[in-house]
């Protein structure tokens, strides 16, 4: 039974329906084996495990799902999507939840959203990540100027932070992607 | 003059809800040649059938149309009722007003009209019906059982016990199958070999059973009751009639390091070997791929030591033909080997569990060998890498099963039980050890099964964690198992000494090939298909070919044995008859118009078209025409539709019948 097919008969569109419409993922496909949570590298920072977020959506506890910090913690590494026995693209699912949360204005981790925005700004400008710009923009956005300052020197000396961006060649193509995405 | 009776069934509400049956009956009586019509709630019930019988007698009916469900369902029922009333059963036809009408419509008025149309068509058709009688075919009362595991042995013993001859074919050098490899069996923990080997010996010594080991079925011709089977007896390189099974050759063979199939690669065997000490027959076989003589032409140590001169390096595969009436397929299963790259691109395997990479990550059958008294460690639980006793063992269920992404969608059914057994055996042998089981659901439906799992948890303190493992990796000599307990929502990391994977049950790699040889259908995984999942679970769709055990789907021992006995009884039902009665709905060739193009032969799925020479009085060949083997013909009508000169007709479905049926619409 697909939640999507039920959508026609419902007056209110549930979060499950919305996700399915946005991504094509049927939330009921998840059989709660927990392999995603077992392999998640940022699991330790989450109060609610990734599979439980899916469970909340399955149960129709939409607010709890959207307000869980877990969706913002997801680093999008795709380990869960790669190993899922049910071909459930959990990273995509989390992205959809973030998108819906932004649309509805229920953002529990504004700092992480700001980080995402700062990150995307660099991609838009350079076609790839530029760590120094990312740190600068993120700190300006959050006014949390001294966060993680202690690790900066080590990163700098390891060559992880460059002072000038390295731009890719075909930045027009990147611009087209952003234009299209912004329009939608 | 044809006197037709029309009987309209309500099928409870199935038809009655959408089709106005009384109106249909009233309309039916107006049709030409229809002399009687009536509607009733359940026509297939005893009173319903009696209505038909009475009407045949009272109204002198010579044809009956029943408007009811699909002929697949109850054509036989109604034809039998007609026969009991003295009418030829083939003068009864079904108008399908359920599947073709009431079930697919919701407008009562329109559906009622359609039901009348369907009846009118059948009435027009039945006017061209003529009495037919069953075709009789003789039966060879001898069975072939393919596969000498517990299913095959059981089926063979049952048929042999009923007094009929059985040919038991096993592709390995010994019968016994996977059951002979097991340590103990759930849910009673009795020793597998102790209960199996007496059966193996019984099958070997039974006067009615002819055993072909190290043999395979090469070809099958013929049809139910009359199969002709070609068996390939592979070259054993040992003369069975001379060998006494003394084992001297096995002892003296200089090759010692061939991985033992019986011990799942955990121990080695010589080039000339008996798979296991209790093997039946106790006759060695030379593995020509590793034998020094077959590789270099030197050695012959076995031949030198054999006191009976039983070694025969020149031996060749032998082809034997046997006539049988029934075939029981009991070819069993294989475990999904996740280290090997699968031919099937959809089956991706599990790099993340490290099977094939880490020596102490093993599968279920390997654990059986480790736990078995006859195994490489003589029953002591020692891990393969350093032969040390593991103090922490993790069992992971559903590896490959219930995994459409990397393995197979289906549940392998037996793993929940054997994993509980493994964990229990481990705890019984290593008292200070810890056993963890990662599971998704525990499926322990069976007599004494759930109690068994509970015992593992409550009495043997096996720690069950509900969650699928994400990864297994090595760190400082330990295997780190990363999982999540989804019940408490807590991440779990276990430092294990050994990991046992309950890998999926898959069909034999040669399953599809054998199915094609036998002409039986199989599913996308290679498991053989039964005709009806509930009512005919041990019959294949080819008459006279029955299924037993895990070749049909993952099965445990009790189910395999039950299925084997069921398949045997199906064969015995067949053998209980002197002649086989077949439906007379078969193709018939008009030899006068047939030009011998044999398009019919090309399209026939059942190999039922044969060549027939037509000769004149002097014996000169006039022409070659097609001829139908009525034993093989299934009456599908493909030849009929293909024939360019319209020289084949399907009896009971001839052109006149079909055309008038269409014309009535």
Image (cartoon, helix red, strand yellow):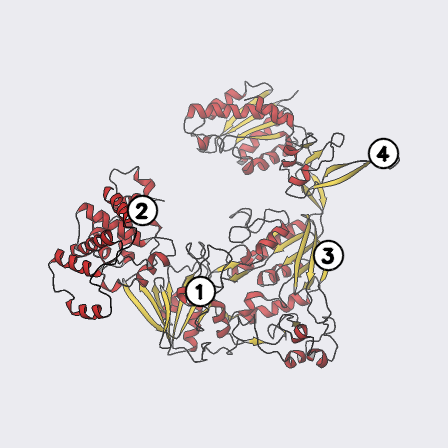
The answer to whether any part of residue B5 appears in the image is no
Q: Is residue B376 left or right of residue A54?
A: right
- Residue B418: give x, y in percent of width and height: 46, 66
Label 3 environment density (alpha carbons within 10 Å; few <14, some 14–19, many ≥20): some
Q: Are the residues under marks 4 and 3 on the same chain? A: yes
Residues tagged 2 and 1 counted as in contact (Cβ below 8 A): no
Q: Is residue B96 left or right of residue B501?
A: right
In the image, is residue B24 above or below residue A105? above
Q: Which mark is residue A23?
A: 2
The residue that disc 1 covers is B502
Viewer-side residue, B78 vs B620? B620
Residues tagged 2 and 3 counted as in contact (Cβ below 8 A): no
Q: Are the residues under marks 2 and 4 on the same chain? A: no
Residues tagged 2 and 4 counted as in contact (Cβ below 8 A): no
Label 2 environment density (alpha carbons within 10 Å; few <14, some 14–19, many ≥20): some
Q: Nearer the viewer, mark 4 or mark 3?
A: 4
Farthest residue to the right: give it.
Answer: B618
Q: In which chain is the residue bearing label 3? A: B
What element does badge 1 sit on?
A: strand
The residue that disc 4 covers is B616
Question: Distance from label 2 to label 4 (Cα)?
Answer: 76 Å
User: On the image, which quarter does residue B629 sit in?
Assistant: top right
Q: Nearer the viewer, mark 4 or mark 1?
A: 4
- Residue B454: give x, y in percent of width and height: 38, 66
Residues tagged 1 and 3 counted as in contact (Cβ below 8 A): no
The residue that disc 3 covers is B321
Question: Distance from label 4 to label 1 (Cα)?
Answer: 70 Å
């Amino acid at each position: 039974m697909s939640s999507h097919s039920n959508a026609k008969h419902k007056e209110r569109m549930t979060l499950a329906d919305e996700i399915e419409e946005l991504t094509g993922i049927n939330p009921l496909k998840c059989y709660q084996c927990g392999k995603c949570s077992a392999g998640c590298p940022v699991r330790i920072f989450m109060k609610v495990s990734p599979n439980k977020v899916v469970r909340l959506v399955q149960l129709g506890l939409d607010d709890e799902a959207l307000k869980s910090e877990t969706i913002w913690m997801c680093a999008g590494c795709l380990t869960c999507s790669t190993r899922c026995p049910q071909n459930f693209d959990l990273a995509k699912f989390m992205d959809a939840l973030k998108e819906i949360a932004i649309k509805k204005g229920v953002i529990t981790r504004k700092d992480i959203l700001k980080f995402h925005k700062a990150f995307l700004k660099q991609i838009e400008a350079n076609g790839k990540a530029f760590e120094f710009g990312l740190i600068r923009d993120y700190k300006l956005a959050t006014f949390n100027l001294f966060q993680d300052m202690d690790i900066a020197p080590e990163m700098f000396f390891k060559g992880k932070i460059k002072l000038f961006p390295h731009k890719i060649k075909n930045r027009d193509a990147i611009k087209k992607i952003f234009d299209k995405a912004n329009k939608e | 003059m044809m006197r037709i009776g029309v009987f309209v069934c309500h099928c409870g509400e199935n038809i009655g809800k959408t089709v106005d049956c009384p109106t249909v009956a009233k309309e039916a009586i107006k049709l030409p040649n229809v002399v009687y019509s009536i509607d009733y709630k359940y026509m297939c019930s005893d009173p319903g059938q009696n209505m038909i019988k009475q009407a045949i007698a009272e109204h002198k009916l010579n044809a009956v149309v029943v408007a009811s469900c699909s002929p697949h369902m109850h054509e036989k029922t109604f034809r039998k009722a007609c026969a009991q009333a003295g009418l030829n059963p083939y003068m009864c036809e079904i108008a399908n007003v359920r599947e073709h009408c009431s079930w697919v419509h919701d407008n009562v008025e329109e559906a009622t009209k359609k039901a009348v149309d369907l009846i009118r068509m059948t009435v027009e058709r039945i006017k061209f019906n003529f009495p037919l009688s069953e075709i009789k075919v003789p039966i060879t009362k001898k069975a072939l059982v393919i596969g000498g595991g517990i299913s095959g042995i059981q089926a063979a013993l049952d048929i042999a016990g009923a007094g009929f001859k059985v040919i038991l074919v096993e592709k390995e050098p010994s019968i016994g199958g996977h059951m002979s490899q097991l340590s103990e069996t759930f849910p009673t923990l009795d020793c597998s070999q102790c209960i199996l080997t007496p059966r193996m010996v019984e099958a070997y010594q039974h006067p009615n059973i002819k055993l072909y080991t190290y043999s395979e079925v090469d070809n099958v011709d013929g049809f139910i009751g009359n199969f002709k089977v070609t068996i390939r007896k592979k070259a054993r390189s040992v003369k069975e009639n001379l060998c006494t099974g003394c084992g001297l050759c096995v002892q003296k063979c200089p090759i010692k390091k061939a991985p033992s199939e019986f011990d799942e690669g955990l121990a080695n065997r010589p080039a000339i070997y008996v798979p296991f000490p209790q093997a039946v027959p106790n006759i060695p076989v030379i593995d020509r791929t590793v034998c020094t003589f077959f590789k270099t032409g030197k050695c012959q140590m076995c031949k030198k030591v054999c006191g009976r001169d039983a070694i025969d390096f020149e031996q060749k595969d032998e082809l034997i033909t046997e006539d049988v009436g029934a075939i029981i397929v009991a070819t069993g299963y294989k475990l999904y080997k996740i280290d090997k790259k699968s031919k099937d691109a959809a089956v991706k395997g599990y790099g993340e569990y490290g099977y094939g990479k880490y020596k102490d990550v093993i599968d279920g059958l390997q654990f059986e060998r480790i736990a078995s008294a006859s195994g490489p460690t003589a029953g002591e639980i020692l891990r393969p890498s350093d032969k040390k006793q593991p103090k922490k063992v993790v069992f992971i269920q559903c590896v490959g099963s219930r995994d459409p992404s990397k393995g197979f969608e289906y549940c392998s059914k037996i793993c929940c039980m054997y994993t509980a057994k493994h964990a229990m055996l481990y705890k019984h042998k290593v008292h200070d050890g810890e056993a963890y089981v990662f599971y998704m659901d525990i499926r322990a439906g069976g007599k004494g099964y759930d109690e068994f799992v509970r015992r593992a948890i409550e009495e043997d303190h096996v720690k069950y964690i509900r969650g699928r493992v994400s990864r297994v990796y090595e760190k400082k000599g330990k295997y780190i198992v990363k999982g999540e307990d989804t019940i408490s929502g807590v991440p779990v990391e276990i430092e294990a000494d050994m990991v046992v994977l309950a890998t999926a049950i898959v069909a034999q790699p040669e399953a599809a090939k054998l199915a094609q040889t036998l002409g039986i259908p199989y599913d996308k995984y290679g498991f053989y298909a039964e005709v009806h999942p509930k009512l005919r679970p041990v019959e294949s769709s080819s008459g006279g070919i029955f299924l037993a055990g895990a070749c049909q789907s993952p099965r445990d021992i009790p189910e395999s044995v039950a299925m084997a006995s069921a398949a045997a009884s199906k064969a015995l039902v067949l053998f209980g008859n002197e002649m086989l009665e077949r439906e007379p709905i078969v193709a018939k060739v008009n030899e006068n118009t047939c030009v011998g193009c044999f398009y019919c032969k090309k399209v026939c799925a059942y190999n039922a078209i044969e060549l027939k020479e037509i000769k004149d009085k002097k014996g000169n060949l006039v022409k070659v025409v097609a001829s139908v083997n009525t034993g093989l013909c299934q009456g599908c009508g493909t030849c009929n539709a293909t024939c360019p000169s319209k020289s084949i007709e399907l009896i009971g479905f001839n052109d006149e019948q079909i055309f008038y049926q269409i014309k009535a619409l």
